[in-house]
Amino acid sequence: MFLFYWVVTPRIRLISIFIITILVVIKSGDVVTMVTDLVYHDIFVEHVMSTNHPESPQRLRSALSSIKSAGLLDNQRINLLTPGKAPLNEVYKLHGKEYLEGIRARSERGEGMYTMDTSVNSYTYDAALYAAGGGIEAVDRVIERESENALVLCRPPGHHAEYEKAFGFCFINNIAVAAKHLLEKHGVKRVLIVDYDAHHGNGTQRSFYSTKDVLYIGLHQDGRTLFPGSGFPNEIGVGEGEGYTVNLAMYPGAGDISYNRAFSEVVEPIADSYNPDFILVSVGYDGHFMDPLTNLGLTTSGFTMMNSRLKELANSFSNGRIVCFLEGGYNLEVMGMCSLNLVQELAGLGVTSFDDTYKESNMASEYTGKLIEKVVAESLLL
Ligand SMILES: [Zn+2]
């Protein structure tokens, strides 16, 4: 009947066309304003561990320089965002007050060595608070639909930091603070954290080991051959959290083939079973075969494969909501290439290909096959 009037009544036809046009304009306006936040603060390059330390400010300079050279800072899809500090009461949910006060006091004095593998200068405490604040702001904006997704390009990194322990170049666990914020401030029920840094994210795992509200999946080099010496397949969580920690401890030399398989047979099926409301990613480029600190065999296209599939998972389960946090990566050229590719992927732009190839050893591939079989057989979510 409506179709009849629509065809025969010019006035109704005109009004309908007008309404449809307005809806299309609003919809397309919505799409144009959706941006990828690139969260960065100048204080991130003021924190210096020690002279010639691999976790250096140059890492961020290299990342930013390649993003800028590709013209992405002028692209309307990218929003460079300067964050504020994380509120202390939110950081206290993940770290002891005394511990944080200790970092603040030592940092104020610019004391240098803090623990065996961390040191502070006068910017460290504030830089750590801005890094954690960047994560909070990034997830807030994604929840509020002010941005589509984000990369928190921060230093110091966070995934090794434990409740009262600065560890592995980390002081405050940025991704854990953001996950807790999502659960408690936004009432999010299920957060998936994927950590593909070459080192096991011991601090993040420990923060959520006994809860099912956060599913932690770590893909890293086997702890028998690399710091921090944890993250084995039998670490699966405890109590209510049993089954909600998944560790894929890769054989040295494992690369794109192994990670591809791990995504198809473990990461994606488990994400499917968990049905996350929000995805957070600990990004580390130290799994690249050129990294000086590790022995894995990923290439830039391996990282792009993971980024693209993580974004796809976010589209399938969490309404596109995904925020990435920079952790490690110590080859400056790789930092530049991989950071550029990640921002391109998040913003839905074409991804630049680089000429870096690596052949994974048969031994690594075979080991990965057995590892995946074990993880799948013992998973409580599959
Ligand atoms: Zn690492």
Image: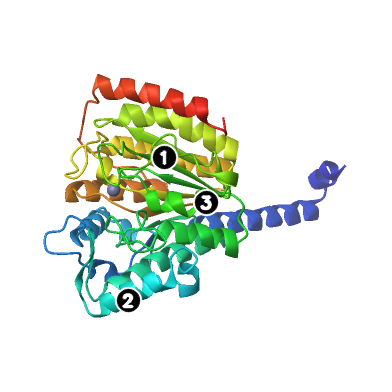
- Say if 254 sits above or below 52 in the image: above
Question: Which numbered circle lies on residue 308?
Answer: 1
Secondary structure under tag 3 reads loop
Which of these two is toward me, 257 or 239? 239
Look at label 3 and name its amino acid. Answer: Arg
Q: First in sequence: mark 1 or mark 3?
A: 1
Q: In whole angstroms, how far apart are the C-alphas of marks 2 and 3?
A: 33 Å
Q: First in sequence: mark 2 or mark 3?
A: 2
Q: In whole angstroms, how far apart are the C-alphas of marks 1 and 3?
A: 13 Å
Quadrant in which the C terminus is drawn: top right
Q: Is 378 left, or right, of 69 in this rendering?
A: right
Q: Which percent across, then down, holds residue 227?
A: 27, 45
Q: First in sequence: mark 1 or mark 2?
A: 2
- Say if 113 sits above or below 193 in the image: below
Quadrant in which the N terminus is drawn: top right
At x 32%, y 56%, the residue is 72
Q: Which residue is mark 3?
A: 321
Q: Give neighbour class at mark 1: few <14, some 14-19, many 20+ (Cα, 10 Å).
A: some
At x 38%, y 22%, the residue is 369
Q: Which residue is mark 2?
A: 104
